[in-house]
Image (tube, grey):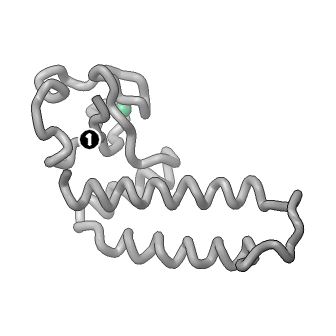
Amino acid sequence: MHPQLELLLELQDLQAQRRALQEEPLRDMEEAVFELRPVEALALLDEKISELVGRLEGSIQRRYVELTETQGRAVAPVLSGICYGCFVATPTAWSSEAGRNDTIGVCAHCGRFLYYVD
Ligand SMILES: [Zn+2]
């Protein structure tokens, strides 16, 4: 897998975790149970996210920042040739290639980074 794609997937995971923390601030549980208060956990996540974004290459970084601001998710899985970001088919020549995740591909329709899961 392309190292920049690995970074993008890692970022996507951290962003999902961040959203979950914000939406579900763990208020049902005893505060004392946590080693880390949610607000601290969020700050640590933000720090890591900025660090990873900083490791993205120029044009990938610009696209990533733009996508997260406009679309929320910047990376979409492709299943059976369909981009799961926008549910539009990706070009077949593309989706049938081996080693597809070794290059950085973007959806021609929604512009998200693509990774193939089938
Ligand atoms: Zn798409």
| 32 on left or right of 11 | right
> x, y (%) of residue 102?
15, 48
The amino acid on which the numbered mark 1 sits, given as a three-letter code, is: Val
Residue sticking out furthest to the front: 33
Label 1 sits on residue: 106
State the image quarter where residue 8 is shown: bottom left
The quarter of the picture showing ligand 1: top left
Label 1 crowd (10 A; few <14 / some 14-19 / many >=20): some
Q: Residue at 55% of width from left, 73% of height from top?
A: 46
Q: Residue at 69% of width from left, 60% of height from top?
A: 21
Who is closer to the viewer here, 44 or 35?
Answer: 35
Above/below status of 18 relative to 51: above
> x, y (%) of residue 67?
42, 50
Q: Residue at 58% of width from left, 78% of height from top?
A: 44
State the image quarter where residue 32 is shown: bottom right
Q: Residue at 18% of width from left, 54% of height from top?
A: 2
| 77 on left or right of 32 | left
Image mark count: 1
Above/below status of 24 relative to 58: above
Q: Secondary structure at mark 1?
A: strand
